[in-house]
Image (cartoon, rainbow, N blue to C red):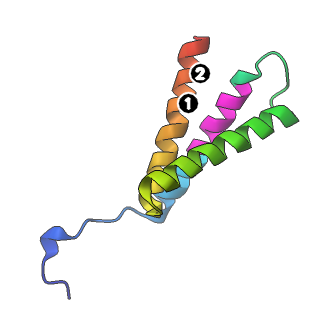
Amino acid sequence: MIENQDTVKPRHPWWVDLCLVVAGVGCDWYFAFMWFFGKHSCWSVPVLRGMVLTGMLCALIAIVADRAKWREAVQIFFALSWGLCGYMMIDRG
């Protein structure tokens, strides 16, 4: 038994992390697609390559920033991806 119940943080379910990763990858795809908008189709090689590189960069920053605490790194990954997506929406407005 845990003696001090006040210091225990409730953990969210695993599917929330999965949803954040999927949404983050979707944001990275949107960022890459809008970057090449008008030049390439939705699923062309440059768009997919841009999505993978953007996703890897966001994941690397999230892991290094949080020092391998995976649940928090997933949230940082989503925040970075969402921020890039928002930047592209404002820029292309």
Residue lying at 20% horizontally and 88% vertically, measured from the top left: 1
- Please name the amino acid that badge 1 sits on: Leu
**How packed is label 2: few (under 14 Cα within 10 Å), some, or many (20 or more)?**
some
From the top left corner, tell me how far across and down residue 41 is, in percent.
Answer: 85, 26
* Left or right of 1 in this view: 13: right
Q: Circle 1 sits in a helix, a strand or a loop, which is it?
A: helix
**How packed is label 1: few (under 14 Cα within 10 Å), some, or many (20 or more)?**
many
- Please name the amino acid that badge 2 sits on: Met
Is residue 32 placed above or below 56 in the rendered structure? Answer: above
**67 or 49, nearer to the observer:** 67
Residue lying at 51% horizontally and 35% vertically, measured from the top left: 82
Is residue 78 placed above or below 74 in the rendered structure? Answer: above
What segment carries the magenta color? 23-33
| Residue beneath disc 1 | 84
| Residue beneath disc 2 | 88
Residue lying at 57% horizontally and 11% vertically, measured from the top left: 93
From the top left corner, tell me how far across and down residue 14 is, in percent.
Answer: 48, 64
